[in-house]
Amino acid sequence: MTGAGPGEADPDATIRLQPLTRAKVGSLGPAGQDWLSRLPATLRELEREWQIRLGRPLPGGSAAYVVAATRADGVPAVVKVVIEPDGLDAQAAILRRADGRGYVRLLGYDPDRRALLMEALGPPLDHTAPAPANWLDLLADTLLAAWRAPEPADTRPDKAGDLAGLITTWWDRLGRPCSPAVYRQALAFAERRRADPGEPVVVHGDPHPGNLLRVLRPRPGAETGYCFVDPDGFVTDRAYDLGVVLRDWTSQLSGADAEPTLRTYCSRLADRTGVDAVRIWEWGFVERVSTGLYLKSFGADGLAGRFLASAEALVP
């Protein structure tokens, strides 16, 4: 990097990882520490390659370092450097194909340095919208735009089968941290979604409120005023994305009201998108359990516990 000018942050001196990112780095052992030790040099190289000036690190994310940037023409941008390369090519490809429709605009991609240069955006949905009901509407409406991204030619993954495998593996390996009833229900729903693939589209893959950010100014492709970041970009049932929308809603799902509350949310998403509410429910449950187990696998026990507790509240 070029160093900090008056009033600017020196990125070399301000590399601060988010808590989940630190946990991810720690879980990878030497590989994670190697990525972290090389990060300052990587950032300097990206400054030269993209003719940008880096600023302060940005909040959010669990597997990358995200930092504000300014382009040579003075336009703000964002740089994301991921810890592991898996899925990064697919993410860059979907952003390129979408060309800003429902998604952040991609300005540059460096696969060797695992880095993306993107348009700058405002705060995420969970920091701006006044009520959860509004979140559902904005997430659903923006997904309807994002689902129009052209479909890639590669083979469709078996997402339900992959999640079933993850649940089976980590439930045993972690000492069965959720009840057998939750475990069996998640596998049963995964098998049903595997047997009935639904209407496939290029899904976002992780459309939670923290991945939906406000655009800085109105533009084509962001008619809702928001767009998605961090897509996984694979082809599967569109109901999968809507299940993920509800996956993180853990604080609202406890006690006797958990099931009727979630059914109301599923119905609202179904009405908004034309996608079957039962499919949304089942994908959401599978994601809720698999995410809880995944988070526990690298030590994020507190967050993992909230996912698994909400799943327990949804089992009869």
Image (cartoon, rainbow, N blue to C red):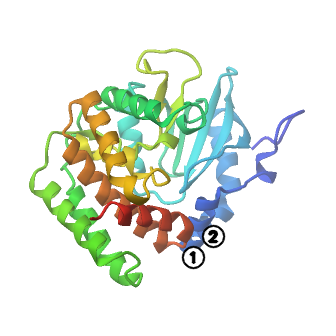
State the residue lying farthest toward the left. 195
- Residue 189 in the image: state x and y as whole percent: 20, 60
Q: Residue at x 44, y 44 (%)?
A: 208
Q: Which residue is mark 2?
A: 33
State the residue lying farthest toward the right. 6
Residue 232, visible in the rendered structure: no
Q: Quadrant of the N terminus?
A: top right
Under circle 2, the secondary element is helix
Q: Amino acid at mark 2?
A: Gln
Under circle 1, the secondary element is loop
- Residue 234 in the image: state x and y as whole percent: 28, 46
Disc 1 residue crowd, few under 14, some 14–19, many 20+, Cα 10 Å: few
Q: CA distance from mark 2 to mark 1?
A: 6 Å
Left or right of 51 on screen, residue 193:
left
**Toward which corner of the image does residue 185 lie, by quadrant?**
bottom left
Q: Residue at x 57, y 45 (%)?
A: 80
Disc 2 residue crowd, few under 14, some 14–19, many 20+, Cα 10 Å: some
- Residue 40 in the image: state x and y as whole percent: 71, 54
Mark 2–mark 1 contact, CB under 8 Å? Answer: yes
- Residue 165 in the image: state x and y as whole percent: 26, 70
Q: Residue at x 51, y 72 (%)?
A: 298
Q: Which residue is mark 1?
A: 29
Query: In the image shown, does 52 or 127 lie closer to the viewer?
Result: 127
Query: In the image shown, does 108 or 125 lie closer to the viewer?
Result: 125
